[in-house]
Image (spheres, rainbow, N blue to C red):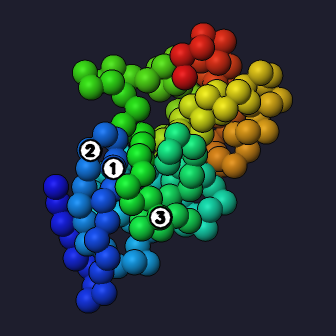
Amino acid sequence: MSQTQSSSVVVPLDLHVNGRRHALLLDPRTTLLDALREHLGLTGTKVGCNHGTCGACTVHIDGRRQLACLTLAASASGRPVVTIEGLAGPDGTLHPMQAAFVEHDALQCGYCTPGQIMSAVACVQEGHARSDEQIREYMSGNLCRCGAYPNIVAAVRDVANAGDA
C-alpha cells in the first residue's frame, strides 16, 4: 500500500484499482484521473480535454464506464476500478478487445485508444453492439481525430460477435 499527501487537507481513501488496494491520503478535490496518473503511476488512462467531452480518461467503476476526469477519487473509494492496465490477463495476454483493436488497426496515433477500448468493452458488456449504428452511437462519447472509427467499429463488432467482452 502506498500513501500520498498533496495538501494540508487530506482524506483517507481506499482505492481498489485493477485488483490491488491502495491506501492514499489525498486532497478531497483530487480527481480519479489525477489519483491514477499522479499518485499510482497508472498513466494508461489519458488526460484529454479534462472536461468530460473526449472520453480519453474512460475507466470502469463497479463495471460501468466512467470519465475519470469528472470523478472525484473520494467517490471511487472502496469501489472496484479497472483501467486499461487492468484489462490484460496476469500473464500479459491481451483482452479480446485489445487484440481486436490490434487486428483491425484501430489504434491510429494511440492517444485515444485506452479510452476507446474501455468504452468498447463496456459497449459490448452493456449489450449495445448489435449493429454498426448502435456501436457508433454508444462509442460517440469517445472522440478520435485520426479517422479510426470504421476500424474501431469493426473491432467492437468482432468481439461482440465472439461473445468475448
Q: CA distance from mark 1 to mark 2?
A: 5 Å
The residue positioned farthest toward the bottom in the image shown: 8
Quadrant in the picture for residue 94 = top left
Q: Relative to residue 39, is residue 149 drawn left or right?
A: right
Q: Position of residue 107 (x, y in %)?
A: 52, 33
| Tag 1 secondary structure | strand
Q: Relative to residue 154, is residue 61 drawn left or right?
A: left
Residue plotted at (67% across, 32% down)? 126
- Tell how many labels: 3
Q: Relative to residue 130, is residue 1 drawn left or right?
A: left
Question: Is residue 151 in sight in this rendering?
Answer: no
| Three-letter amino acid code of the residue under disc 3 | Ser
Q: Which residue was labeled with disc 1?
A: 16
Q: Which residue was labeled with disc 2?
A: 20
| Three-letter amino acid code of the residue under disc 1 | His
Give yes or no for contact between labels 1 and 2 (Cβ–Cβ under 8 Å): yes
Mark 3: give few (<14), some (14-19) or many (20+) Cα within 10 Å.
Answer: few
